[in-house]
C-alpha cells in the first residue's frame, strides 16, 4: 500500500511541477489549459519511462556482450603471443 501512495505522490508532484513550468513558459495559457497540459505531460512521462528503461537495459546488455567479446579476443591474442614467445 505504501508503494501505491508514493507512486501517487510522485505523480502529483510531477503534475505540480509541470503546471508551474507551463505557468512560467506559457503564461498565456488559462489555469485549465495549464492543468490539462500538465496532466497530459505526466501521462506521457509515465508511458515513455518504461520504454526508456527497456532501452537502457538493452543497451547495457549490448555493452556487456561487447565487453565479453573484447575479453575473449584479448585472451586469444595473449595466448597467441605466448605461443610465439615459446
Image: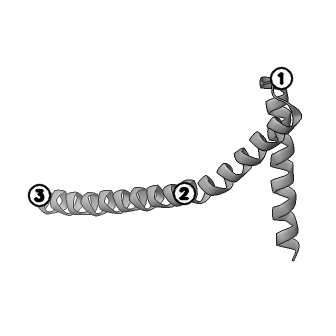
Give how far across and how far down residue 2 sits, in percent. Answer: 88, 73
Are the residues tagged 1 and 3 within 8 Å (C-beta)?
no
Locate the N terminus by quadrant: bottom right
Task: Name the image quarter holding residue 7.
Answer: bottom right
Which residue is under mark 3? 84
| Local crowd size for mark 1, using a 10 Å CA cut-off: few (<14), some (14–19), many (≥20) | few
Give how far across and how far down residue 85 sits, in percent. Answer: 14, 57
Q: Of residues 26 and 53, which is closer to you in this image? A: 26
- Residue shown at 83% from the left, 41% from the top: 35
Nearest to N terminus: mark 2 or mark 3: 2
| Local crowd size for mark 2, using a 10 Å CA cut-off: few (<14), some (14–19), many (≥20) | few
> Is 42 left or right of 17, judged from the image as shown?
left
Which residue is under mark 2? 51
Give how far across and how far down residue 10 sits, in percent. Answer: 83, 56
Cα separation, mark 1 vs mark 3, equals: 74 Å
Q: Of residues 39 and 81, which is closer to you in this image? A: 39
Q: What kind of element bears circle 1?
A: loop
Are the residues tagged 1 and 2 within 8 Å (C-beta)?
no
| Local crowd size for mark 3, using a 10 Å CA cut-off: few (<14), some (14–19), many (≥20) | few
Amino acid at each position: 500500500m505504501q508503494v501505491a501512495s508514493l507512486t501517487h505522490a510522485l505523480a502529483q508532484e510531477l503534475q505540480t511541477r509541470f503546471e508551474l513550468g507551463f505557468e512560467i513558459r506559457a503564461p498565456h495559457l488559462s489555469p485549465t489549459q495549464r492543468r490539462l497540459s500538465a496532466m497530459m505531460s505526466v501521462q506521457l512521462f509515465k508511458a515513455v519511462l518504461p520504454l526508456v528503461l527497456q532501452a537502457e537495459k538493452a543497451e547495457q546488455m549490448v555493452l556487456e556482450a561487447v565487453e565479453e567479446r573484447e575479453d575473449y579476443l584479448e585472451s586469444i591474442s595473449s595466448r597467441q603471443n605466448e605461443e610465439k614467445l615459446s
